[in-house]
Amino acid sequence: MDGTLLLAAGTAALSALGVWESYWHQRRLASIPIRIHVNGTRGKSGVTRLIAAGLRAGGIRTCAKTTGTLPQMIFPDGTEYPVFRPARANVKEQIRVVRAAALQRAEALVIECMALNPCLQSICELKLIRSTHGVITNTRADHLDVMGPTVQDVARALAGTTPVGGKLFTAEQTHLGILTAAANDRGSQLIAVDDEQVAQVTWDELERFSYIEHPDNVALALKVCHDIGVDRTTALRGMWHAQPDPGVMTVAQTEDSDRHTVFVNGFAANDPESTGKIWELVLQRFPQIDRRIAVVNCRADRADRSAQLAKACLEWTPADHYLVTGTATHLFARQATSHGLDRQRITCLENKPLPQLLSTLNRQIGRSALVMGMGNIASPGMELVQHFDRQRNAVGSVIPANQLAIRRAA
């Protein structure tokens, strides 16, 4: 047999294998009656966990998979295992997740969308998940290099995971027109969570979480659980006891005889709108702090985020100092100063090790300080989080969410 025939035979064999794999994948999908595909700019991992926990509390055998800070597979008893990746992230791993859920005889699968490319997002929904319930948390100006250039384009990209003939849930309000058009195009019902429904999530209920959870995410997850048949009280009870995603916002404080430091891990909220909301929130919580320090962790391959954050931070309550770490720190400094930020309040620590960052930070803290990490959690960010975790265990304590006493402004 010559090379041409061998190539043709190999191609035919691979094609047959693809058809056979597709057949079994569709059978596995059909064995899971409730399939929930969670997408959005911020809060995907958290909402995935909230919905799964609410369904488990309601007696529904549920598997879940988050992409988040650390990709995790969550089984019906709530146990978690990391998702093995032999190479870089690939949407084909969703096939393995569906297989695992089917082997667990799951009645529901809650799965976080892991695609950024608009075409891949749509393919993940139409070919890999075929959800009965779609969820889009929100649409914000992030990953504009892939989904942009505008936030409207981001909304259109995220709308690619709208189910066919199902239901689409969202807490987004600004770009509802785009999501409505997508739902109509695919014959789905759009169910939007509005301000009134978000306000029904009380602060007493939020304080029952072991971390800081956003009311929009809780309201959205409760709406999905209610539609599937789990009452609000039961779903909330499950959500309170669920393990949070490793990337959730935490607040820790350390204190010794002459220094009090509050550290806020806000790295996961790396779009300007979310970061700004968290910054203002924690400033309200700690008005007695003498110094406010923003640690901005940059990445050379995320230049757009650095530029957006530099421009946006001028609209927030100003920090007393900005420590800019990571790579391509000059991009943040140049953008921020061009928009009016005093260059004397910026210290660039381009690709510097943690000891040098801590030394510079200590000179800025003084008697008491609020230090918030923002931007990206890549190497310097994660090292800083781990440092404060070690310090907390040695001399301080985590501030539980139920002691934060954060209230809505009157």
Image (tube, helix red, strand yellow):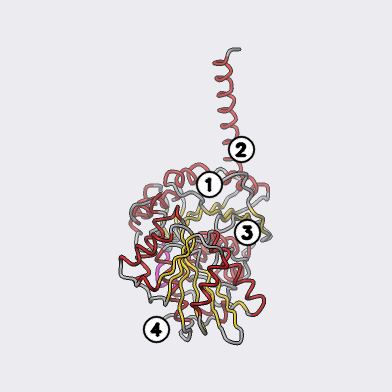
Of residues 215 and 393, the one drawn nearer to the viewer in this rendering: 393
Going by the numbered disc 4, the residue's amino acid type is Ala
Is disc 4 placed on a helix, strand or loop?
A: loop
Q: Quadrant of the N terminus?
A: top right
Badge nearest the viewer, 3 or 2? 2
Badge nearest the viewer, 1 or 3? 1
Labels 4 and 3: the sequence-earlier one? 3
Estimate the x, y position of residue 357 in percent, counting from the top left: 53, 68
Q: Residues within 10 Å of mark 3 (few under 14, many from 20)?
A: some
Question: Which residue bears the numbered disc 3?
Answer: 60
Of residues 187 and 71, the one drawn nearer to the viewer in this rendering: 71
| Residue under the point 49% across and 66% down | 217
Badge nearest the viewer, 1 or 4? 4
Question: Which residue bears the numbered disc 1?
Answer: 129
Report the span colored magenta.
192-198
Q: Residues within 10 Å of mark 4 (few under 14, many from 20)?
A: few
Estimate the x, y position of residue 308 in percent, counting from the top left: 37, 61
Question: Which residue bears the numbered disc 4?
Answer: 410
Q: What separation in Å lies between label 4 and label 3 (alpha carbons)? A: 39 Å
- Is 11 placed above or below 340 here? above
Estimate the x, y position of residue 153 in percent, counting from the top left: 35, 52
Q: Are marks 2 and 1 in contact (CB under 8 Å)?
A: no
Q: What separation in Å lies between label 2 and label 1 (alpha carbons)? A: 13 Å
